[in-house]
Amino acid sequence: MVAANIVIKSCYFVNDFSCYEIAKDFASPVLATIAILFSVLIAFMQLSKQHKNTLELKKEETKSKTRIDLFKEINVLLESSNTKIREVHSYCFGKKYSNLEMRAEIDHVEFLELMKNFSNALLVVASKMESHEIVNFKLFRVFRFALYSIHHDLLALQKEQDRFKVLESLIKLTDDSMMYFGDFQVCMQNMAYGVVFDSTVPQRIPADKRIKVITNCPENLDKLHIYFERESNWGKNCLKYENEAKEEFSS
């Protein structure tokens, strides 16, 4: 009986307080706790967003710096090779216009020396393009294919008996090479510095629309890729050997 009376009295003690009074007493601490948790959550989200933005900014800065460093590295190589090609072009051009007829021939010994210098200048750049295609796959590959195409036509001149035609062809091939080098340098400048200076270098626009121009335009690069891979002398030769290899190993 004593225990029962104690329980009843305890219940009476609780009943003396209303739910409102109990809630009022605990409301402030609970709300304060919720506010603190909410503030911490917002702060965490802001810090997370700032961290993400910082990482993205660093990523873009790294990419930009990499593009600029790569452009400088490649540009040194392009200038070096282009200088050698210009020397070949100047020699052939001067030889052609050394007489009133503006027609001259080049002997085989001269040609072999010029071919060696021209060939080395093309291949060293083509090799560099192949090892850096990840930078811009389509652009670097098309430029490389263009150089291989010129190199193929250069080597084919070894069998040409018409020495006048050899000289004319050398002038044409060096012209094409210098134009492609210039096109690629424009693309690289725009890639490396376009965002930095908020400007772009205009592409080459030849009067003869049949002339190929390398631009960093996906549609144009697709067309050039098809042309060099399938329609150029180099491309046709590659397809020929590829088909011959398939026939040989499929039988």
Image (cartoon, rainbow, N blue to C red):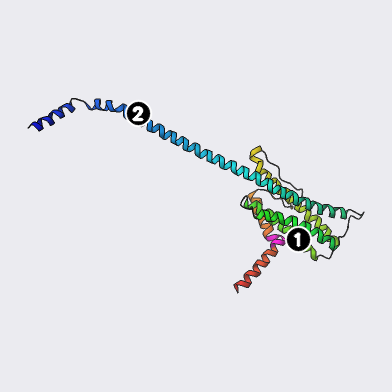
Quadrant in which the C terminus appears: bottom right
Q: Residues within 10 Å of mark 2 (few under 14, many from 20)?
A: few
Q: Residue at x 81, y 59 (%)?
A: 113
- Residue 119 lies in quadrant: bottom right
Q: CA distance from mark 1 to mark 2?
A: 82 Å
Residue pointed to by mark 1 = 153
Residue pointed to by mark 2 = 32
Q: Residues within 10 Å of mark 1 (few under 14, many from 20)?
A: some
Q: Secondary structure at mark 2?
A: helix
Name the one closer to the observer, 125 or 2.
2
Picture layout, residue 3 above or below residue 181: above
Question: What residue type is disc 2 on?
Answer: Ala
- The residue mark sitting in front, 1 or 2, is 2
Name the one closer to the observer, 248 or 114.
114
Whole-percent x and y of residue 239?
Answer: 67, 64
Name the one closer to the observer, 129 or 215.
129
- Residue 8 lies in quadrant: top left
Residue most toward the bottom?
251
Q: Secondary structure at mark 1?
A: helix
Q: Residue at x 41, y 33 (%)?
A: 40
Left or right: 244 with respect to 16? right
Q: Residue at x 76, y 62 (%)?
A: 155
Whole-percent x and y of residue 36?
Answer: 38, 31
Magenta: main secondary structure: helix
Residue stretch rendered in magenta on the structure: 230-235
Q: Check residue 233 for magenta coloring.
A: yes
Question: What residue type is disc 1 on?
Answer: Asp
Q: Residue at x 62, y 43 (%)?
A: 65
Residue most toward the left?
1
Label of residue 99 in the image: none
Q: Check residue 24 for magenta coloring.
A: no
